[in-house]
Image (spheres, helix red, strand yellow):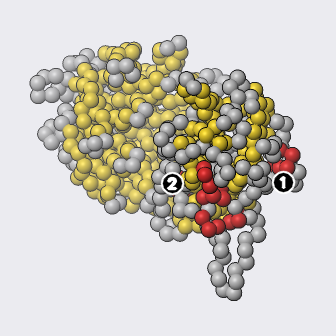
Amino acid sequence: TDLRPLDILSEVVPAGRPARGMRVFRVQGVRGFQLAATRPGALRFPASRLFIHCDHFPEEFSIIVTLRVLSVPAKRNEYVFTLMAEESPSVLVGLRYAPDKLHFLFWSQERAGGWQTRVTFPNVSLSDSQWHTLVLAVSGQSFSLTVDCSIPKDVVVEAPFPASLSVKRASFYLGSRRRRKGLFTGLLRQLVLLPGADATPRICAARNLKVATLSVPAVLQDLPAQPANNEVLKYPYETDTKVTLGSRPPCTRQEKAQFWFNASRRGLYLCNGSAWIAMLEVKQRLDYVEEYQNLVTNSETMGVEVFTIPKVGLFAATANRYTPPGSAIYKWTDGKFVPYQNFPTYQAQSWKYFTIGKKIFLAVANFEENDRGQEFSVIYKWSRRKEKFVTYQRITTHSARDWEAFVIEGEAFLAVVNHREGNNHNIDSVIYRWNPRTGLFETNQTIPTSGAYDWEFFTIGPYSFLAVANTFNGTSTKIYSHIYIWLSGSFQLFQSILTFGAADWEVFHIGDRVFLAVANSHSYDSGMPAPSNFYAINSSIYELNVTAQMFVKFQDLLTYSALDWEFFSVGDDSFLVVANSFDGFTFSVNSIIYRWQGYEGFVAAHHLPTVGCRDWEAFHTPEGSYLLYSSAKEPLSKVLKLKTT
């Protein structure tokens, strides 16, 4: 080849127009290509188009790249380009970047065989959403990288760049290495090979060093050709203010950096490649609550769990009292929950959805024995092939009330609340640890509990906590519930709080403040005179006092056999909803939504008629925000929609 710049990027722009799988964006006043190829290797061309007079790669050369990178996940590499032979998966020449590194790859060849050589330039940060120009100069064993004309980074390696690297039957691949892994997701403006010379002096003579130009495709040049008469622009481009209107569009890698205006929410959103991120949004305020769906369940429902399986949909699992017909999960379809799958359960109390890596699980807490007199709770695993949950592991439990799943220091745990064994309420609840070798949960620690109802796991800074709601010790509900802290590989007692038939803990954050709310269900002590009403008692909200290193009482709220708290937000407002189940006379009791009022604490805002309310779940869909409550006294749960202004 002669010593002219070889514009690799222009070779994939046929007739001066972007190829299929390429889009032009203007960002920060500079145009670049987004490579949105539907299949790896779509953006390619034979090396013979560049190397017309010689079928060997230059021995000395520079590679000039101008690009803009949004972000790169940890441990991920993306390829700017590769040169690969048709019959081999090896990279002859290639350039790829990681979050803080740049790698130059080349194929070293000897008679005995060949091997891949990688030259790494550390501490090269490109993922800042800014334009950068890189000049990589190669000569023998010396490799020099200049970023935005800063001080060069020089690397000398043992294996020199080959003096005669054949490019026969080889092709350049733009933004990939001929497979899906490592596809380029940023914007590319310039990709030039300059044989026989260090291009740094030529590039660094430019005024704007970050977008210095040696050769750029015409469609990306700053002054596109003017149309003749009324002819449309020859080089149309998209700006970073392009907006999609209407219903929620998909947000995938192809839509990355596009905007969507949601007229109903009066919000502007940016696609980050997987989800729409709010850029400008009118903050919503809760106006009122309306009945949205009557969800007929198999029987009375003791608990409900709402969860989303990626690429499958939104689900609600109901823990139902009787078998048959057992418990069920429902799928959100056309704006309503519809039956999806049934499970044989035995006075099921609750469900817990969790994931370990790519595995998806759903655990049920069974309160009673099965037909064979065996007392098991069951962990189900999602089958992607069947698109259903299948039995995965059975664990012996004792009148199980609740499961809690959590991760500490990269290890997965699952804790069960054992309520009683026979008439003995003072028994151990168990924490299980996931064994990745066997693929099973194994006993890790036991904790003494008293008629326990609920576990609540939470973290504060680097510390992990687990709170248990103790309900009844055999003679009294006026007993201590405990908060444990993870230290030296196990949970140790951190704080004890006096509770009255505690049925639930709910941790939540408002700004930098950390709160812990307990739902007290009833006050009973066999050795004390009976109160006028066992069930009309205060439930309490505690706040973490960092100085004292303990939770201190913040507020008491009068509740009626409270069984659950659920925290949720609407716009900038924070709310707590309580499940009031029984007032001593009737199960038809109002459950209350409390609004956070700062100095006033939580103030009653909405009174919701419920029947034997057992559990609340808040969830969101593109159409709005909802509350789902389960009834322990009738086979009917309700979905309520939060109407906002």
Above or below, 446 relative to 64: above
Determine whether, in the image, residue 185 is placed left or right of residue 216.
left
Q: Is residue 213 above or below residue 450?
A: below
Which of the two residues, 71 or 350, is positioned nearer the viewer here?
A: 71
Query: Which residue sits furthest top?
Result: 488
The alpha-carbon separation of the residues under discs 1 and 2 comes to 32 Å
Residue 7 shows in this picture: yes
The x, y position of residue 175, in whole percent, is 58, 48
* Residue at screen point 50% across, 30% down: 458
Which amino acid type corresponds to the residue marked 2 in the rendered image? Answer: Ala
Callout 1: SS:
loop
Badge 1 or badge 2: first in the primary sequence: 2
User: Where in the figure is residue 462, as x and y percent of width and height?
Assistant: 59, 25
Q: Amino acid at mark 1?
A: Asn
Q: Mark 2 and mark 1 in contact (Cβ < 8 Å)?
A: no
Is residue 452 visible in the rendered image? The answer is no
**According to the image, label 2 marks what residue?**
42
Residue 400 got which mark?
none
The residue where tag 1 is placed is 208
Q: How many neighbours does mark 2 have within 10 angstroms: few (below 14), some (14-19), or many (20 or more)?
A: some
